[in-house]
Image (cartoon, rainbow, N blue to C red):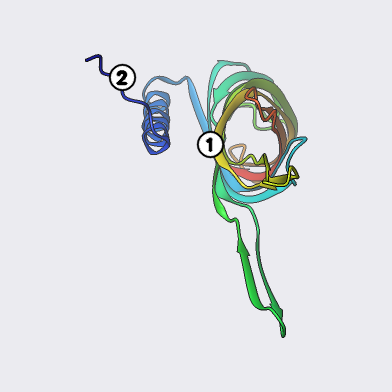
């Protein structure tokens, strides 16, 4: 009898990703020329042709490693990770039908690997610029409500919540405004990711972070 190889379950996939993320952070602290990071909040919207838009509020942590660096600019790699909840919750009451609860809230994570060009403020700890910007691209992971269409017994198509992982190319751009000394700065980031699976989900994001 031929045994089938074991399949990777989603919990195993997520554990492997988190383990790899912490290995990445450890490597940065050990070997980087310049390590910078920030924390903040974000809003993400997932949308595709077959689903209602799913909005997520997230907590954000953005570590990066500058491997090329001058007084005015840097080139960096990083993993801006966002964790939150997506979906919706509603409770309706009718004197005839009673109460009806709809809950599609679920865990959401967005974590692209990004290569960025950073100019001006926030590009390094040595720059004296008070304003800066960045732009870059990479490849990302998104886990959340990507939705699907199901056909009922009468032949009608309906949207159904479905949580799953998708991969795809990603891009981001934003500005940084220096505050205080040692190039601490406020960052505003816009991001986009396109899933390459059958759902073709588009992920839009906006983040505000404090880099220290």
Q: Name the residue under label 2.
A: 5
* Residue at the image position 65 percent from the left and 41 percent from the top: 147
Asked if residue 84 is positioned above or below residue 114 in the image, the reply reads below
Label 1: how many Cα within 10 Å (few below 14, some 14–19, many 20+): some
Quadrant including the N terminus: top left
Q: Name the residue under label 1.
A: 37
* Residue at the image position 69 percent from the left and 21 percent from the top: 136
Q: In this view, does 121 lie to the left or right of 7?
A: right
* Residue at the image position 54 percent from the left and 26 percent from the top: 78
Q: Which of 77 and 94 is in front in this view?
A: 94
Q: Position of residue 41 (x, y in %)?
A: 62, 49
Quadrant including the C terminus: top right
Q: Quadrant of residue 150?
A: top right
| Disc 1, SS | strand
Asked if residue 146 is positioned above or below residue 123 in the image, the reply reads below
Instruction: Check the image and name the residue furthest to the left.
Output: 1
Q: Quadrant of residue 108?
A: top right
Q: Nearer the viewer, residue 114 or 73?
A: 114
Q: Which of 63 and 124 is in front in this view?
A: 63
Give the mark, 1 or 2, whose residue is nearer the N terminus.
Answer: 2
Label 2: how many Cα within 10 Å (few below 14, some 14–19, many 20+): few
* Residue at the image position 38 percent from the left and 28 percent from the top: 8
Q: Position of residue 111 (x, y in %)?
A: 55, 33
| Disc 2, SS | loop
Q: Where is residue 42 in the image (x, y as percent from the top left)?
A: 65, 47
Q: In this view, does 26 lie to the left or right of 60?
A: left
Instruction: Check the image and name the residue furthest to the bottom.
Output: 95
- Cα separation, mark 1 vs mark 2, equals 40 Å
In this rendering, the label closer to the viewer, 1 or 2:
2
Q: Which mark is residue 201?
A: none
Residue 71 seen in the current view: no
Asked if residue 92 is positioned above or below residue 198 in the image, the reply reads below
């Amino acid at each position: 009898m031929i045994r089938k190889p074991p399949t990777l379950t989603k919990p195993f996939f997520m554990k492997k990703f988190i383990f790899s993320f912490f290995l990445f952070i450890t490597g940065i602290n050990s070997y980087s020329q310049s390590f910078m990071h920030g924390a903040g909040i974000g809003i993400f919207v997932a949308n595709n042709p077959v689903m209602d838009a799913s909005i997520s509020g997230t907590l954000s942590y953005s570590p990066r490693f500058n491997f090329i660096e001058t007084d005015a600019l840097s080139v960096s790699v990083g993993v801006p990770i966002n964790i939150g909840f997506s979906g919706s919750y509603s409770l309706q009451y009718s004197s005839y039908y009673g109460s009806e609860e709809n809950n599609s809230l679920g865990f959401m994570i967005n974590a692209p690997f990004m290569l960025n060009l950073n100019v001006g403020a926030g590009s390094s700890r040595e720059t004296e610029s008070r304003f800066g910007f960045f732009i870059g691209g990479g490849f990302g992971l998104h886990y959340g409500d990507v939705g699907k269409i199901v056909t009922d017994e009468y032949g009608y198509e309906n949207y159904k919540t479905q949580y799953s992982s998708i991969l795809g190319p990603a891009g981001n751009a934003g500005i940084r405004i220096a505050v205080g000394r040692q190039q601490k700065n406020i960052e505003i980031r816009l991001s986009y990711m396109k899933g390459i699976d059958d759902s073709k989900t588009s992920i839009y994001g906006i983040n505000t972070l404090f880099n220290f």
